[in-house]
Image (spheres, rainbow, N blue to C red):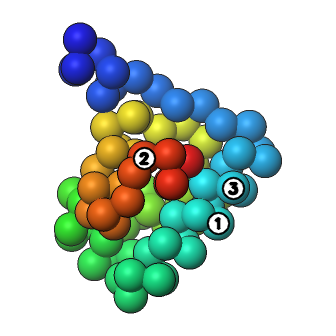
Amino acid sequence: MLDRILYSRLYYEKKEARDMENKLKTIRKAKNLSQAELAEKSGVSRATIANIERGKQVELLVGTVAKLASALDVSISEVI
């Protein structure tokens, strides 16, 4: 069951993608992390992080969001 949840896909409309882009970038910068540092800490590629922050990544695995939230020490709901 957990595997199914972690590999569920999140789809975003343009507005939701912009919201996530702003939240992720704001939290990352508040934690004084570069995209590369967040990538290393989370195991999510820097390219994926950059795409999320530019609003170009409109489909994400829940597991990806969970990795980012964990690396930033915030809840998933704070990121999405």
Q: Between 10 and 78, which is closer to the camera in this rendering? A: 78
Q: Secondary structure at mark 2?
A: helix
Q: CA distance from mark 1 to mark 3?
A: 5 Å
Q: Secondary structure at mark 3?
A: helix
In the picture shown, does residue 51 fall above or below 3? below
Residues at circles 1 and 3 in contact by the CB criterion of under 8 Å: yes
Give the label, 2 or 3, closer to the camera.
Answer: 2
Mark 2, residue position: 76
Query: Is 50 situated left or right of 20 in this image?
Result: left
Q: Between 19 and 60, which is closer to the camera in this rendering? A: 19
**Residue 22 circle label:** 1
**Residue 19 circle label:** 3
Q: CA distance from mark 2 to mark 1?
A: 14 Å
In the picture shown, does residue 72 fall above or below 18? below
Q: Secondary structure at mark 1?
A: helix
Query: Is 26 situated left or right of 72 in this image?
Result: right
